[in-house]
């Protein structure tokens, strides 16, 4: 297992070269879209000379290719940004670099982070780290795989409805989606602004605490960032844990439920109280999500017009330029979501869809709040199944959406949630358990996850 | 509640979305959008009378900043260089009217 401490105090140049070699030797997984070799080695030399210091000095990492970075392209795995070289870096990247971390490359994703398998990448899917006939999960599939393959000790992802937690579960690594507003989204390609969050993949909870501690905090460039609150903490004894019963029905894979039950038994053995709880509105959360998120996508993706940056199609009129640039630049799932967004926001349908979904969201927040009056942490699976086969869900968009059913509730309510490895299925596929905390209690779920490691 | 999306609906949505679709895309989107709307329509069963909408979950309101000029990290030349077609510090586009 590769952890951050393995890289501290070593030659940064060696760390970076080893990571680049490991990345090149793992090309068959298609987890990476580009390497930023030149810039990474320049920065490594500065760490080795003592010019750059910090808590992550000389530690290599990989960012999902929807984070703006210098030294290469930022494509969002789309044709419309295929040749886009960002003129600035995301705040999250800047904060990691200020502590001496070194970005060595950019990870594959579903184009514009629309998807749950990385099969919607315009450049081809990422393969699962354990079974190459299966999906990596998504949308941050590449980031999960590079950590699982131990190419780097941590990688960045974005999570709008499960895009960090689901691939973490499918590849057996830790993945955290923080409280909405914890980490600045400045310089990250926007998807759905009311649920977009920035988090990371690591091989243990302590590393996630460190990376989140570096990235978190108020940023004047992102007015939705919360006042600084994040700080690692110790696990509190005798936590009250609620198991969401709607996540543990017979529709969920039996091996997945078995691994979750085993983790629950370990929580009890560690002195925590565990009870079954109900979140009845869960049956409607996926419908809410697939109204609210496409609405926000249709607005956010309007900026890709072929005028100021990105791909521009040959056209004789402005209308044709917009229409053809966007048709050539987006993948099918981008178009589906943009058009659903246009539909639910159009006059005559707005109240029935968008407003109804935002009201339903209030009911979801209320149900969570009521549970958190009694319970400290809620748990359940991350996804109903382990990693599915490549191509298994690509013909039916709704079937693909159903994989998000357990991750979207925390997203819509802005709650912190983490996927923690809970063992494997009988076929050897990783299973994650999801720990969901109260808003701004990210450190508590991380502390609980850390306390349970090595306790199997 | 089922929703049937016609070919004309797809064309109208494509126009609203600035997408110039191929014939094959129009056909597959007609089926896909009908399916997706069929799924999300179940939300109409939920009674939300008297419930206020939740548009954001930060509890932050009217976030301001000090009224000082902050230098942008990207300069004008770098931003202009991103445009696919330029002339004399302007972005060039096809005829509008």
Image (spheres, coloured by chain):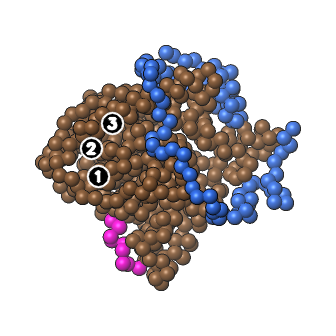
Chain colours: A brown, B blue
Q: Could you tell me which secondary element the residue under label 2 belongs to?
A: strand
Looking at the image, the residue that sits furthest to the top is: B1
The residue to which callout 1 is attached is A444
Residue A9 in magenta?
A: yes
**Residue appearing at x 62%, y 31% in the figure:** A342
The location of residue A353, given as percent across then percent down, is 53, 25
The location of residue A327, given as percent across then percent down, is 67, 39
Classify residue A202 by image quadrant: bottom left
Whether tag 1 and tag 2 are in contact, CB under 8 A, the answer is: yes
Between discs 1 and 2, the one toward the N terminus: 2
Judge by depth and name the residue closer to the eye, A53 or A396: A53
The residue to which callout 2 is attached is A377
Whether tag 3 and tag 2 are in contact, CB under 8 A, the answer is: no
Which class describes the residues within 10 Å of circle 3: few (<14), some (14-19), or many (20+)? some
Q: CA distance from mark 1 to mark 2?
A: 8 Å
The location of residue A388, given as percent across then percent down, is 38, 40
A88 relative position to A60: left or right = right
Between discs 3 and 1, the one toward the N terminus: 3
Residue depth check, mark 3 versus mark 1: number of the one nearer the observer: 3
Which residues are drawn in magenta? A2-11
The residue to which callout 3 is attached is A369
**Residue appearing at x 54%, y 49% in the figure:** B63
């Amino acid at each position: 297992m590769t952890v951050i401490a393995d890289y501290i105090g070593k030659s940064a140049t060696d760390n970076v070269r080893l990571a680049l070699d490991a990345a090149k030797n793992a090309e068959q997984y298609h987890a990476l879209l580009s390497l930023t070799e030149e810039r990474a080695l320049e920065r490594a030399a500065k760490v080795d000379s003592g010019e750059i210091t910090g808590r992550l000095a000389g530690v290599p990492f990989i960012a999902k290719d929807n984070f703006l970075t210098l030294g290469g392209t930022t494509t969002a795995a789309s044709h419309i940004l295929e040749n886009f070289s960002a003129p600035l870096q995301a705040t999250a990247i800047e904060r990691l670099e200020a502590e001496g971390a070194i970005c060595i490359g950019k990870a594959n994703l579903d184009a514009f982070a629309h998807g749950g398998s990385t099969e919607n990448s315009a450049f081809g899917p990422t393969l699962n780290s354990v079974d190459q006939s299966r999906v990596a999960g998504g949308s941050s599939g590449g980031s999960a795989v590079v950590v699982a393959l131990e190419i780097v000790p941590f990688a960045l992802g974005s999570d709008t409805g499960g895009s960090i937690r689901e691939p973490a579960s499918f590849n057996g690594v830790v993945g955290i989606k923080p409280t909405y507003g914890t980490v600045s989204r400045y310089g990250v390609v926007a998807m759905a602004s009311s649920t977009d969050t920035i988090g990371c993949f690591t091989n243990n909870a302590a590393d996630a605490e460190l990376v989140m501690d570096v990235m978190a905090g108020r940023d004047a460039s992102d007015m939705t960032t919360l006042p600084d609150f994040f700080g690692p903490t110790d696990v509190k004894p005798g936590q009250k844990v609620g198991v969401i019963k709607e996540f543990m029905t017979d529709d969920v894979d039996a091996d997945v439920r078995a691994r979750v039950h085993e983790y629950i038994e370990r929580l009890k053995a560690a002195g925590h109280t565990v009870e079954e709880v109900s979140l009845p509105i869960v049956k409607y959360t996926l419908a809410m999500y697939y109204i609210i998120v496409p609405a926000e996508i249709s607005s956010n993706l309007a900026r890709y017009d072929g005028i100021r940056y990105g791909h521009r199609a040959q056209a004789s009129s402005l209308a044709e330029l917009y229409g053809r640039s966007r048709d050539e630049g987006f993948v099918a799932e981008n178009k589906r979501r943009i058009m659903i967004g246009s539909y639910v926001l159009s006059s005559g349908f707005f109240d029935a869809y968008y407003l109804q979904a935002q009201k339903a969201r209030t009911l979801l927040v209320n149900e969570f709040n009521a549970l958190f009056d009694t319970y400290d942490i809620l748990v359940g699976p991350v996804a109903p199944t382990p990693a599915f086969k490549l191509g298994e869900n690509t013909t039916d968009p709704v079937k693909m959406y159903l994989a998000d059913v357990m991750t979207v509730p925390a997203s819509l309510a802005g709650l912190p949630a983490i996927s923690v490895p809970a063992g494997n299925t009988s076929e050897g596929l990783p299973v994650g358990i999801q720990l969901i905390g109260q808003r701004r209690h990210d450190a508590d779920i991380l502390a609980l996850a850390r306390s349970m490691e090595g306790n199997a | 509640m089922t929703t049937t999306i016609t070919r004309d609906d797809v064309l109208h949505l494509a126009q609203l979305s600035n997408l110039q679709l191929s014939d094959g895309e129009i056909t597959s989107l007609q089926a896909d959008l009908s399916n997706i709307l069929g799924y999300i329509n179940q939300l109409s069963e939920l009674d939300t009378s008297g419930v206020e909408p939740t548009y954001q979950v930060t509890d932050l309101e009217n976030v301001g900043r000090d009224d000082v000029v902050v230098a942008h990290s990207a300069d004008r030349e770098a931003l202009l260089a991103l445009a696919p077609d330029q002339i004399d510090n302007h972005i060039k586009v096809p005829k509008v009217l």
